[in-house]
């Protein structure tokens, strides 16, 4: 199955939906016209350079066309068009947030392997669907689903963040329904296929974001190499240590407040210094962003550990979900700590527009964001920060719980 490039469908695309059978009435159309004018003016005035990828004329023509068609569109169609229009700006920090309104999620998580969408996390009750391929939603083939979602999912800068955004989009109830993929709100029929060709069907209700996060915790069995923590701030910011190999593993999946990071970084520095650690592995594969200046405090703490192998002992794991500040700090680790980057390209580009300003549309109350800075973390432009060592996870490796990128680093260290 082929995933469409994030550059496809630049022309006007009106998504057909079944969310509502009726177009907005004249009063609502007037309110949406006001929202669209506010949207356009805010992006034009607040974005550092709104027209870096699409001309001012083309963007304005898109806005005018949308306003002219309001009387023929349902509210979900208008939302989908604004999401599509925002994607034409072509930077991941400029977005139209469908999740700024009430939103629900189907309690499964998906990951793309070799063109197949695989179930990698479920609730405990739905354990039997783990490892299976998602082949359809409400009877619509997954290839068609992804084709529909490709031009509208947000936070996309390259083909790698497109993959990550699509996989999350497959869980989003309101998005799937507004895009005409699911037949009704709050429920959908997912069709799966096992590797032996057998089929599974599941009709599932969506849940709140809180329930989604808390319940989708049953996953493919992972053969975890680092199990005990030596320094802990949270489940997503902690350090494990192997005293035999003198290898420290730092899971840096989320940013804390500056004061909390300083406490964690000081504890890491003290621990590594006492252990006379030689090697550090920093895992940024699930770090989708925050404040990269906070991450610099961790880098500074590591710089003060004299025992580390400063020529060959620092490694950073990156992947398609490494975005925004996570991407920025990956380049900082490479530049400041002589780190070797291992894994897959990042979802954020090293050179481009970042930092987020926010606004709320006055009538519909949907949130929008826009980029306010431009950064250059490399001399050359590449789609994502490219790893020094490219390691793509295969489904067979993942299914067996093998972390090939981490294992490559450990093998390299042992040599």
Image (cartoon, rainbow, N blue to C red):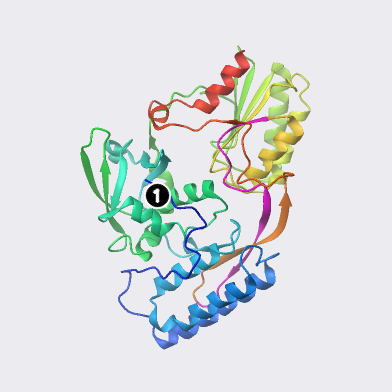
Q: For the C terminus, which image quadrant?
A: top right
Q: Which residue is mark 1?
A: 211
Identify which residue is drawn at 47% across, 60% down.
151
Q: Is residue 69 in view?
A: yes
- Asked if 381 appears above or below 11 in the picture, the reply is above
| Segment tinted magenta in the rendering | 340-363
Q: For the N terminus, which image quadrant?
A: top left
Q: Quadrant of residue 335?
A: top right
On screen, residue 181 versus residue 249, left or right, reads: left
- Asked if 55 appears above or below 272 in the picture, the reply is below
Identify which residue is drawn at 27% across, 43% down.
192
Q: Nearer the viewer, residue 118 or 35?
A: 118
Identify which residue is drawn at 72% across, 18% down.
274
Q: Nearer the viewer, residue 148 or 269?
A: 148
Q: Is residue 354 magenta?
A: yes
Q: Nearer the viewer, residue 309 or 291?
A: 309
Image location of residue 195, percent across then percent down = 27, 34
The residue at the far left in this view is 198
Q: Quadrant of residue 149?
A: bottom left
Image location of residue 226, percent across then percent down = 53, 23
Image location of residue 46, percent across then percent down = 68, 69
Mark 1, secondary structure of its residue? helix
Q: Nearer the viewer, residue 165 or 390?
A: 390
């Amino acid at each position: 199955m082929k995933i469409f490039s994030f550059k496809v469908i630049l022309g006007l695309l009106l998504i057909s939906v079944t969310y509502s059978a009726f177009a907005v009435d004249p009063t609502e159309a007037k309110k949406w016209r006001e929202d669209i004018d506010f949207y356009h003016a805010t992006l034009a005035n607040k974005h550092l350079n709104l027209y870096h990828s699409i001309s001012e004329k083309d963007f304005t023509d898109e806005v005018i066309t949308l306003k002219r068609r309001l009387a023929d569109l349902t509210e979900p169609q208008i939302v989908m068009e604004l999401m599509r229009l925002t994607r034409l700006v072509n930077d991941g920090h400029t977005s139209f947030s469908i999740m700024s309104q009430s939103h629900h999620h189907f309690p499964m998580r998906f990951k793309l392997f070799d063109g197949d969408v695989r179930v990698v996390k479920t609730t405990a009750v739905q354990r039997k669907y783990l490892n299976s391929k998602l082949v359809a939603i409400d009877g619509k083939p997954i290839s068609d689903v992804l084709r529909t979602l490709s031009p509208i999912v947000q936070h996309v800068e390259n083909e790698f963040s497109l993959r990550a955004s699509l996989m999350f989009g497959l869980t989003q109830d309101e998005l799937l329904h507004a895009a005409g993929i699911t037949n009704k709100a709050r429920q959908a029929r997912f069709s799966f296929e096992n590797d032996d060709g057998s089929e599974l069907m599941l009709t599932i209700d969506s849940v709140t974001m809180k329930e989604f996060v808390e319940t989708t915790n049953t996953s493919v069995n992972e053969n975890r190499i680092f199990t005990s923590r030596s320094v802990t701030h949270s489940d997503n910011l902690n350090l494990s240590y192997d005293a035999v190999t003198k290898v420290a593993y730092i899971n840096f999946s989320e940013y804390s407040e500056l004061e909390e990071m300083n406490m964690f970084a000081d504890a890491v520095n003290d621990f590594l210094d006492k252990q006379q650690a030689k090697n550090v592995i920093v895992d940024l594969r699930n770090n989708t962003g925050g404040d990269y200046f906070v991450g610099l405090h961790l880098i500074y703490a590591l710089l003060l550990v004299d025992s580390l192998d400063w020529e060959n002992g620092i490694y950073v794991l990156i992947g398609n979900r490494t975005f925004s500040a996570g991407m920025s700090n990956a380049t900082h680790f490479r530049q400041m700590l002589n780190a070797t980057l291992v894994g897959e390209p990042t979802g954020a580009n090293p050179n481009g527009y970042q930092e987020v300003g926010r606004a709320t549309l006055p009538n519909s109350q949907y949130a929008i964001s826009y980029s306010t800075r431009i950064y250059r973390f490399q001399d050359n432009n590449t789609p994502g920060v490219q790893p020094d060592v490219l390691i793509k996870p295969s489904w067979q490796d993942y299914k067996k719980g093998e972390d090939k990128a981490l294992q490559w680093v450990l093998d390299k260290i042992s040599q």
